[in-house]
Image (cartoon, grey):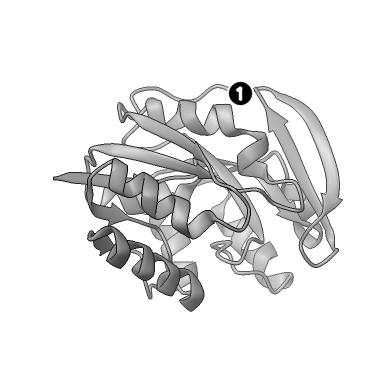
Amino acid sequence: MTRIALLSGGKDSLYAASKFWPPDLGLILVYEFPVPSPHLLNLGKSVETVLLTGLNVIVAKLTKGKEREETIKILKKLNATEIIAGDVYVEDHLKYMENIAENVGATLREPLWDKDPEELVYEIVEKWGVNALITGIKDCMKDWIGKVLSKDTIDSFVLDAKKCNYDPLGERGEYHTLVLRSPLHRSELGYEVVKNIRTKDFNGKDYYIIKVI
């Protein structure tokens, strides 16, 4: 039996994995996007933050247009019997993962599903105690790029998200994070910002990303 956590290096996926800790393996899937991805740009640090929890991790690159079939193939090769994911309320994401699990013959675990996004971001940051670097964010909240989401900043962040009509959890891609510290970490992830990028998101709107090493 193999329990596999789908991880990105961000706060939500790690928190979901914590509900079934420890999984046997972390799996980071790399997608081809038509626009720059904060997770892909900082892939090395995403792997590093997972390793700091003591969890082994595998990275797999997926071919555009073949993501579903390749994900199924990878999970079968890894003998996955349980798959842990961090979806919250996007129905298409859940249905996609349910299809993946069914074809793999594994049980899908979605511990964050249907939770209130604002309550959940407070649960992750304030109660669980995550510090997460904001590595990508939409234009309305561009001043938050490169800042750390923590107990000290969560109130201001959620307030600004509401002003911009953004989901404070970032479930629809409003922003992306890199976990620097959590209760699972054996030590804090160090980083240095080496590049600031202004680009466009899927809707052609300004999006801000940082690259760290």
* 88 left or right of 159 in image: left
Name the residue tied to disc 1: 191
Q: Position of residue 207 (x, y in %)?
A: 80, 53
| 154 up-or-down from 180: above or below | below
Q: Position of residue 127 (x, y in %)?
A: 36, 52
| 85 up-or-down from 59: above or below | below
Q: Residue at left 29%, top 58%?
A: 104
Q: Position of residue 103 (x, y in %)?
A: 31, 64
Is residue 110 among the parts visible in the rendering? no
| 6 up-or-down from 210: above or below | below
What type is the residue that disc 1 sits on? Tyr
Q: Residue at left 38%, top 25%?
A: 52
* 213 left or right of 194 in image: left
Q: Residue at left 30%, top 42%?
A: 77
Q: Position of residue 213 (x, y in %)?
A: 64, 22
Mark 1 neighbour class, 10 Å CA radius: few under 14, some 14 to 19, many 20 or more: few
Which of these two is toward me, 137 or 98?
A: 98
Which of these two is toward me, 56 or 121?
A: 56
Is residue 41 among the parts visible in the rendering? yes
Q: Residue at left 68%, top 36%?
A: 41
- Picture quarter with the N terminus: top left
Residue 154, picture quadrant: bottom right
- Label 1, secondary structure: give it: loop
In the displayed orientation, state which residue is furthest to the left: 1
